[in-house]
Image: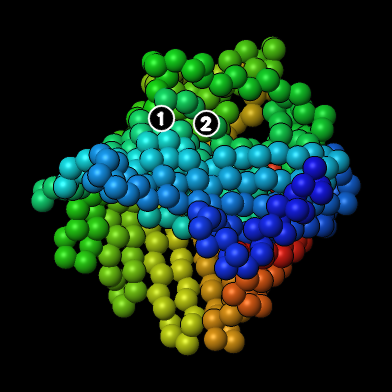
Amino acid sequence: MKRIFFALFLFFALPATGFADWPQIHGFFEADYGVKVSDDNTKRDNYNILEQRLQLRLNHYFSGENYLAQKGGALAFRGDFTVDEYYSGKTDFELRELNLSLTPMSFMDVKLGRQTLTWGTGDYLFINDMFPKDYVSFFTGRDDEYLKKPSDALKVSIYQELANIDLIVIPHFTPNTTPKGDRLSFFDSFQGGIAGVNSDRDIIEPPFQMSNNEYALRLNRNFGSNEAALYYFHGFDKNPRSYMDEAARKLYYEPLDVYGASLRGPFASGIGNVEIGYLNSRDDRDGTNRMVENSFFKAMAGYSKDLGNDLRVGFQYLFEQRLDYDEYRDNLLPNDYRWDEYRHLLTNRITKLFKNQTVMVSLFTFYSPSDNDGYVRPSVSYDISDQWKITFGANLPWGEDDITEFGQMKRNKNIYTRVRYSF
């Protein structure tokens, strides 16, 4: 398989002049290596990422007198072939994009098939964006592109004077990719602490049936230079937070409705944004079931500014409140872990470009004064040429307690490098 992988890389890296009649295929070849700088109990002692990746991208625009050509039809493909040395050279293929888009009417766009979905105003913070994420990629040092996971969906966008409408239907549930103990350790309540390969849980996904379809709706409109949006989501929490059967160590993704709003626009010579969301836990509307996660209220505010000379800074504040907290607390058993009612989180991003914008130095910091934990993500990337790029970075989570969001990740500190050839 490795030989095939290498041959594919050479084939697509060849100059395109000899293949002028072939479809325009683009993509990249990439090698990633991340060294651990803290001890844990995962599958490997020395590293948590060592892989080679080939991504191919193809866009086809229909032509002629057929319906698809008349409606601006386009077919998009994006797929990743990987060789993962963390699992002894395991080969895999991930279809990240395969969809058909067209404009059936002058005020409507439609996209059908696998696609990456995103909305909201946060920078690495998500309130109304309930589409799936890959946090294992995030904490191991893969490119930011891999934080967002694709979904199989139908997206319809309608453009009207009163407001634009985005309606998304997702027939097949896709969860977040979260640490399971093999590559990244995490807090496992069944183990009573941070667990690695000793974790033993069974996570139940919603069955594939029509009643489990997920729906997402966004209404947005510009008021001058400001963009306002309303959101609604009907589906499931993407993290397995609730217990289906505690004795059998079974977790599940509880049903969730999310109602929210956001506003983004010019503010104090920069860009400001605010966003709020109410997350309604449908299986525990009163907060009295200790097995099921309660409803939440979340709000955040952000500000970013270009200071000139290719220097940009951004700040965010996130507030979270677990609702019906008295009912939640009163129904806990003596040995249950008790989560806090409030959480405050601050973030800061600093980005500076050097050498004609070929070198980018970035630092992103999370800090929670309520949880007394945080996460630092420094990185340096260099565009050696139009094809070659090298990146160095680190993932440095820390925390006082094992049960907080970043505290449970404190044994996953790593330093990584990534080399990419684009074609």
Residue 302, located in which quarter of the rendered image?
bottom left
Give me the C-alpha separation between circle 2 and circle 1: 9 Å
Disc sitting over residue 174 in the figure: 2
Q: Where is residue 210 in the image (x, y as percent from the top left)?
A: 39, 16
Q: In this view, does 40 lie to the left or right of 248?
A: right
Name the residue rendered at 22%, 40% in the picture.
104
Crowd tier of the residue under label 1, counting other residues whose Cα lies within 10 Å: few below 14, some 14–19, many 20 or above: many
**Quadrant where the image shows the N terminus:** top right
Q: State left or right for residue 145 relative to residue 406.
A: left
For the residues bearing labels 2 and 1, Cβ distance under 8 angstroms: yes
- Callout 2, which amino acid? Thr
Residue in front for this viewpoint, 52 or 58: 58
Vertical position of residue 173 compared to residue 77: above or below: above
Q: Is label 1 in a helix, a strand or a loop?
A: strand
Q: Where is residue 358 in the image (x, y as percent from the top left)?
A: 58, 80
Residue 205, image quadrant: top right
Q: Which residue is drawn at 46% across and 69% down?
A: 314
x%, y% of residue 337? 64, 29
Total marks placed: 2
Q: What residue type is labelled 1?
A: Ile
Residue 320 visible in the displayed image? no
Q: Residue pushed farthest left?
A: 161
Residue 19 visible, this orientation: yes
**Residue 194 on image: x %, y %:** 76, 37
Q: Name the residue under label 1.
A: 170
- Quadrant position of the C terminus in the picture: bottom right
Which sits in the foreground, 218 or 38? Answer: 218
